[in-house]
Image (cartoon, helix red, strand yellow):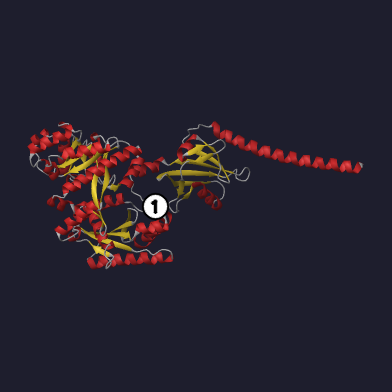
């Protein structure tokens, strides 16, 4: 009996001891974790450095206010939740959910580590961040801490520069514009030539829909790496748009040599992609030569796109060298006019928008609405290829009416979505100016969509405005009384008299791009531009410089006291969904 009591007592003592030990250890862990959390909480909530602590099962148990703001975290009772998808990628990796990406890195790294210049994608917007991953508590309390700080230096470089494509690491289209213009000037001095080769992935949209965005991104990165490895010795390579690469090649002797280079690169791409049995990649190529096919980067690249479009729609050839005739959709103008009439019925036309920025504040003050033709067979067609004929046949009036309706409707849509207010600039042709009931037709659209005319600006070329100055004055006054502002476009390309200019009720002059192209190297151009700016300001008009492509052009325009600028340096004309991304980043 005594032995039984003694054994029972010993048993309970052992159980009690184990309980005390376990409880003590648990309490110690809890106190340790609480102490660390309190230490974090006691620091400034709005510290620039965002901090989160999460468990192995991805439950976020702590986030300071900087982290809540940066990562769109919602504060629940005991933990935090992501209100939006937060994706992560390094320049050499596909997009992946942030915490999953960190887990993968932890398996590779030893101890705490840094992930500098990482890219977070939140709700479609990219930001560059430096991340410090602290796993010192992983074994003790099962938690991981992240310290995130936005890389403002890189962010500013992206905002002001934009010269690197962050998917591939290649120079971007903005670098291409700048480098090609520099090469043009150098080639002119040396009487040399060069060529541009634009390669585009065939059926890119279909591949993206089938294989997915991440897969396609990785494919494009692989192609970029291969290009740099194999072809960078004799060419400079740029990433253009989402599916295109531009090569600058010097000393191409003739067309045969150009075809040989293009076909070799196309064969290389096909061979390189054979490693992935799930992917069958074909590309086409458009080629231009300087100086024959263009006098500046914009013209050369536009013509390169035209040649590529023809190549991608020609089953007999994957390479096309630009020909001036290829810039016309049809040799028969009557057929082309019929195609445009059908295009209006079939809604093949669409608007692209190009932002205009204030040079003093760097704020976007307006966007020019520009018509494009998405032809079912030819693809996206530049306006140079159809607007001149539309003006000759009078179809420009119907195209103009389409632009007004679409732009006003889009303005209303942006208002509903809460985007900031800015002016939309619409080009007005000479034929449209002559329409007596034009302002009535426009006012009907403003009333239909409940849009204020004060947010619209009419862009009218200098030559059109001066054809009949008396009628132009009356028309402009009607537009102004309706609440519309007016810009005199392409100023400097015609021969306006100062007296006539003074009599026009306009608010802005837009300096023709022909005066901007060589402003950085031609003192005469600087003198003319300065005279125009001074004249405009003396008359109470603001000034926009169009066709700005280089940083040093901006510096000169600022020194000449120019008010605003637009051009490929800031953004090319882009479709609505891309323009909205620009708006979100403002």
Binning the other alpha carbons within 10 Å of mark 1 as few (below 14), some (14 to 19) or many (20 upward) gives: some
Find residue 290 and report its image quarter.
bottom left
The quadrant of the rendering that contains the C terminus is top left
Q: Is residue 204 visible?
A: yes
The quadrant of the rendering that contains the N terminus is top right
Residue drawn at x 22%, y 46% as measured from the top left? 402
Residue drawn at x 19%, y 48% as measured from the top left? 399
Q: Position of residue 135 (x, y in %)?
A: 57, 45
Write down the residue under mark 1. Answer: 167
Q: Position of residue 106 (x, y in %)?
A: 55, 50
Residue drawn at x 8%, y 34% as measured from the top left? 499
Residue 314 to residue 29: above or below: below
Q: Is residue 110 left or right of residue 341?
A: right
Residue 41 to residue 100: above or below: above
Find residue 536 and report its image quarter.
top left
Q: Is residue 518 visible?
A: no
């Amino acid at each position: 009996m005594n032995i039984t009591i003694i054994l029972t007592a010993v048993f309970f003592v052992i159980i009690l001891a184990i309980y005390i030990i376990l409880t003590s250890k648990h309490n110690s862990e809890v106190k340790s974790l609480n102490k660390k959390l309190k230490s974090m909480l006691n620091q400034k909530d709005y510290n620039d450095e965002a901090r989160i602590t999460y468990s192995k099962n991805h439950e976020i148990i702590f986030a300071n206010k900087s982290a809540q703001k940066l990562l769109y975290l919602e504060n629940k009772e005991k933990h935090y939740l992501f209100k939006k998808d937060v994706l992560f990628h390094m320049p050499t990796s596909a997009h992946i959910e942030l915490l999953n990406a960190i887990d993968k890195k932890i398996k590779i790294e030893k101890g705490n580590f840094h992930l500098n210049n990482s890219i977070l994608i939140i709700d479609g917007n990219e930001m560059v961040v430096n991340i410090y991953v602290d796993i010192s508590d992983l074994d003790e309390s099962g938690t991981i801490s992240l310290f995130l700080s936005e890389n403002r230096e890189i962010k500013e470089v992206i905002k002001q520069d934009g010269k690197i494509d962050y998917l591939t690491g290649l120079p971007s289209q903005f670098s291409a514009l700048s480098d090609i213009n520099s090469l043009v000037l150098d080639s002119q001095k040396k009487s040399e030539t060069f060529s541009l080769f634009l390669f585009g992935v065939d059926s890119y949209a279909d591949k993206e829909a089938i294989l997915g965005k991440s897969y396609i991104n990785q494919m494009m990165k692989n192609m970029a790496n291969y290009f740099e490895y194999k072809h960078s010795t004799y060419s400079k390579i740029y990433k253009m748009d989402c599916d295109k690469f531009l090569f600058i090649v010097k000393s191409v002797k003739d067309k045969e040599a150009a075809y040989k280079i293009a076909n070799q690169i196309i064969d290389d791409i096909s061979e390189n992609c054979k490693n992935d049995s799930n992917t069958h990649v074909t590309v086409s190529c458009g080629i231009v030569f300087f100086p024959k096919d263009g006098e500046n980067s914009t013209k050369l690249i536009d013509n390169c796109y035209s040649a590529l479009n023809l190549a991608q729609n020609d089953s007999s050839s994957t390479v096309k060298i630009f020909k001036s005739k290829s810039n016309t959709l049809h040799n028969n103008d009557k057929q082309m006019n019929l195609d445009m009439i059908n295009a209006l019925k079939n809604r093949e036309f669409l608007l692209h928008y190009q932002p205009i920025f204030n040079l003093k504040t760097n704020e976007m003050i307006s966007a020019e609405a520009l018509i494009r033709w998405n032809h079912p067979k030819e693809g996206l067609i530049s306006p140079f290829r159809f607007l001149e004929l539309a003006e000759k046949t009078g179809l420009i009036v119907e195209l103009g009416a389409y632009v007004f309706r679409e732009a006003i409707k889009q303005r209303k849509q942006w208002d509903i979505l809460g985007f900031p207010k800015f002016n939309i600039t619409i080009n007005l042709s000479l034929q449209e100016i002559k329409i007596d009931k034009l302002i009535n037709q426009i006012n009907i659209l403003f009333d239909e969509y409940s849009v204020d005319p004060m947010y619209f600006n009419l862009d009218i070329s200098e030559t059109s405005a001066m054809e009949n100055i008396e009628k132009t004055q009356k028309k402009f006054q009607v537009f102004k009384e309706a609440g519309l502002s007016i810009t005199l476009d392409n100023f400097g390309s015609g021969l306006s008299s100062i007296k006539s200019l003074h009599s026009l009720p306009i608010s802005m002059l837009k300096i023709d791009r022909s005066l901007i192209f060589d402003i950085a190297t031609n003192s005469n151009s600087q003198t003319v531009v300065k005279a125009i700016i001074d004249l405009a300001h003396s008359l109470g008009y603001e000034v926009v410089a169009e066709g700005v492509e280089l940083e040093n052009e901006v510096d000169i325009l600022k020194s000449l006291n120019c008010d605003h600028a637009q051009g490929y340096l800031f953004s090319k004309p882009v479709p609505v969904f891309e323009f909205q991304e620009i708006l979100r980043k403002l």
